[in-house]
Image (cartoon, rainbow, N blue to C red):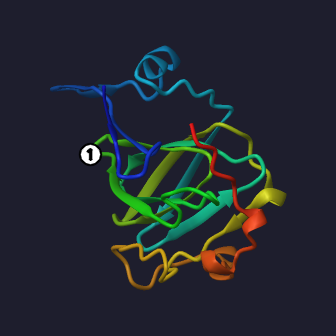
Amino acid sequence: MKIENTRLPGVLLIEPKVFVDQRGFFQEIWNQHRYAKAGMPETFVQDNLSRSRHGVLRGLHVQNPNAQGKLVYVLEGSVFDVAVDIRRGSPHFGQWVGIELSADNHRQLYIPPGFAHGFCVTSDSALFAYKCTDTYNPSAEFSVLWNDSDIGIDWPIDNPELSAKDQAALPLSQIDPMWLPAYLAT
């Protein structure tokens, strides 16, 4: 397994070992001991799965309190996956990183608690899975506007299909800072 830091501290790109032969492939998705040894000692408490068609964009989602760290990966298809640092007081506040995740490249992305997360489907459809460090709390969830010009995400899609909740999202500058997770320097 190979783990790389991205330009946002704490957001990790993981390339698991994939064993390929004439029958197909084998890949370990999660191994608590192996990931902890590699520097990711997370405890995951909930697994989620979504299927979306081409052009669907989900996000940028945040949960605070009960912030969720997420280990995300694609089982079928491909997505452009994004993490945005929205922790008030962070030296990287408002910065983003985007990574292509696909069933073919087997990559995983770890997004720590305190980051907004979203993805758009770039294939005909995608089966997207993620492990979470806290359970879903709908009363603590909100969205940051997917195309907030101050953040400037370079999405590979111009007119995504959005949920009503994501259509009503506010730009980061219009969200009450007290709603945002706090940056805790380590």
Image vertical order of residue 169 relative to residue 178, above or below: below
Q: Quadrant of the C terminus?
A: top right
Q: Position of residue 184 (x, y in %)?
A: 64, 44
Q: Residue at 45% across / 25% down in the picture? A: 39
Say few, some or many: other residues with alpha carbon within 10 Å of mark 1 (under 14 / 14 to 19 / 20 or more): few
Image vertical order of residue 28 relative to residue 135, above or below: above
Q: Position of residue 127 (x, y in %)?
A: 46, 51
Image vertical order of residue 24 relative to residue 144, above or below: above
Left-right relation of 100 to 153: left
Q: Which residue is mark 1?
A: 104
Q: Residue furthest right?
A: 139
Any part of residue 133 in sight: yes
Left-right relation of 82 to 138: left
- Amino acid marked by disc 1: Asp
User: What SS does tag 1 mark?
Assistant: loop
Q: Residue at 53% across / 75% down in the picture? A: 146
